[in-house]
Amino acid sequence: MKLKENAPFSITELWSIKTKYKFNCLCLNTLFRETGLNLAVGGEDGVIRVYDLTKEDGYKSPQLSLETKSGPIQAMKIEDITKFYHNDLVTVDSCGMMTVFCNRQILCRQSITDSCLNCLQIQKDKTGNLAIILSSDSGTVCGVLPSNVLWRINLNELKLNEVRSSALSVKCQLTVNLTDEHNQKSSYVLVSDSDFQMYVIHQGTVVMVIKTPSIITAMCSGNFVKSEKLPVTLTATSGSGSGEQVALGSDTGALFIFNNFSITEFANAQYPITSLSKLPFPDLEQDLLLCAGYFNELQIYSDGKLLDKFPTSDWINSMDTADIDGDGVQEAVIGCMDSTLHCIKFSPP
């Protein structure tokens, strides 16, 4: 199905609440149980509040609060890290601390760095092994398990950055499966810094550094643009173009696609971008791209074109997607800097 020109694409708000606490991040998944969707919200006070979205009005107040006993939560992921019970919760905070909750209890706390940990991803390789990938605003990137550090890189200590007068910070990161020039699919970590550079990391080693047109501040993977709109490279193979695009958002508002290890601009949000999210849509060839930043709206892009906007009362600082109402189509929950949470539903023309 193709979106018709000027066809009515509707966005409906299912619910919204104003919380009594400040937050920086949120995530949607099943947590500490077998089934049913939860919304976890990471507070400035170091507390994670968990809402049960399977209950009617479950979004109105949290059913569970988890204390990290540390600083403001900067990022969170829900994943079965321990393989003990059900999904676990991993958080990172401003004090450089990683906290892992298993079965509602703190399983472990690791002090990773003295600076603020601002990025967190879970990497899964071909054999199913998991690693927690963390980055800090002082330029540290590391892969860890709940019990130990697997690898650590300080971007400031890399040879190409030795002559730098000011310290680099990590702006964003993404774990993604990419196909290399030998047509082998591998798990990589993409990391962008404060000096127009994107690092491609494989198994704890920087294998490539790419100069970016702007400072990259947000990333997500999916299939966002028809492949014919992207440049053909020598390494491109018939299978490597599908589903391996990485959308990059930047501090200038420019949106790029990273595909076959090259970068192409495809849209512009006009203002700095802080978060991107993929929204797969039934019958649409391309994923929708949700874009938020220094503007009072959520922008929705389809195949490089701005499809629609959802106005908000403040800048959006966090978002995630999941099938909340069970109809087979994903919805989005967005959090704004004025402490409001909104659940929105997308309907095709």
Image (tube, rainbow, N blue to C red):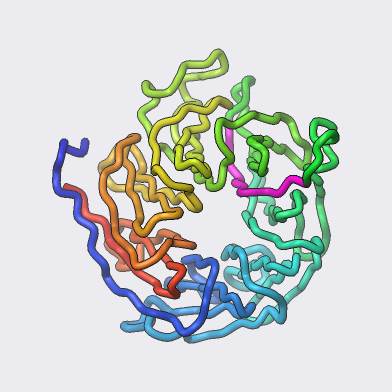
Name which residue lies at 78% across and 44% down.
166
Name the foreground residue: 114 vs 280: 114
Query: Can residue 107 be spotted in the picture?
Result: yes
Name which residue lies at 75% across and 49% down.
139
173 versus 73 height, above or below: above
184 versus 156 height, above or below: above
Q: Position of residue 310 (x, y in %)?
A: 29, 58
Tell me: 136 left or right of 1.
Answer: right
Tell me: 2 left or right of 342.
Answer: left
Q: Position of residue 86 (x, y in %)?
A: 58, 71
Task: Please check the rendered image and state whether residue 171 is part of the magenta-colored stretch, yes or no.
Answer: yes
- Range of residues picked out in magenta: 167-178
Task: Please check the rendered image and state whether residue 10 is part of the magenta-colored stretch, yes or no.
Answer: no
Tell me: 107 left or right of 276.
Answer: right
Outermost residue on the front side: it is: 165
* Magenta-colored segment: predominant secondary structure: strand
Place residue 181 in its image quadrant: top right
305 versus 262 height, above or below: below
Tell me: 7 left or right of 15.
Answer: left
Q: Quadrant of the N terminus?
A: top left
Name which residue lies at 34% across and 57% down.
297
Name which residue lies at 40% across and 74% down.
340
Query: Can residue 131 be spotted in the picture?
Result: no
Q: Position of residue 288 (x, y in %)?
A: 34, 45
Q: Position of residue 335 (x, y in %)?
A: 43, 67
